[in-house]
Amino acid sequence: MRLVTVVLVLLLVLIQYPLWWGHGGWLRVHELQQQLAQQTEKNTNLRLRNERVQGEVQDLQSGTAAVEERARYEMGMVKDSEVFVQFVSPNTTAPVNSANVPGMNGSTRGQVSAAPLRVVPNPVSRSKQELRDLDKKAQKEKAAEAKKKQQAGAAN
């Protein structure tokens, strides 16, 4: 009788082994459920991010408001008829400009520039071609001035 009991207990242990540690055992199922929960959470976060990006793409494609906002905040642009005014308290120190700090993304959104401002009473809008022509003219004038200095130095 003792031998039968030992054999039955041994068979019970052999049957239980695959249930707990086998290929489809309870421990493996528990691990897979944890991985599934993590992946589901990751997918939810990525789905939300994709929806935000999709909304931004639609804004950029459908209207000019999003493009205008990006031009204003990220590139510091203003319209032709606008005058940019910035109020800075005289007692505060200027914040660090993120464009000059390594490791920053270069965005100027919400940051104050430390550069002094000059007031232009009646700004004139110019096309890119006019600006190129002005640059070429200034370069020619600098070259002519440098040539005169060189000739004056050679005469002495």
Image: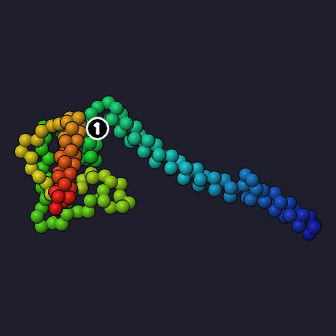
Q: Secondary structure at mark 1?
A: helix
Q: Position of residue 22 (x, y in %)?
A: 76, 56
Would you place residue 111 above or below residue 66 in this image? below
Would you place residue 132 above or below residue 33 in this image? above
Q: Position of residue 38 (x, y in %)?
A: 54, 53
Give me the residue at 15% from left, 37% from top.
125
Answer whether residue 11 is visible to the viewer in this image: yes
Q: Position of residue 79 (x, y in %)?
A: 18, 39
Quarter where residue 151 is shown: bottom left
Camera-side residue: 51 or 93?
Answer: 93
Q: Residue furthest bottom?
A: 2
User: From the viewer's perspective, is 15 left or right of 46?
Assistant: right
Give me the residue at 20% from left, 58% from top.
154
Image quarter in which the C terminus is found = bottom left
User: From the viewer's perspective, is 46 left or right of 5?
Assistant: left
Camera-side residue: 129 or 64?
Answer: 129
Answer whether residue 115 is visible to the viewer in this image: no
Question: Three-letter amino acid code at disc 1?
Answer: Val
User: From the viewer's perspective, is 76 left or right of 5?
Assistant: left
Image quarter in which the N terminus is found = bottom right
Numbered circles on residues, count: 1
Quarter where residue 128 is shown: top left
Q: Residue furthest left?
A: 121
Q: Position of residue 139 (x, y in %)?
A: 22, 46
Would you place residue 106 above or below residue 68 in this image? below
The residue beneath circle 1 is 67
User: From the viewer's perspective, is 88 left or right of 10?
Assistant: left
Quarter where residue 25 is shown: bottom right
Give me the residue at 78% from left, 60% from top.
17
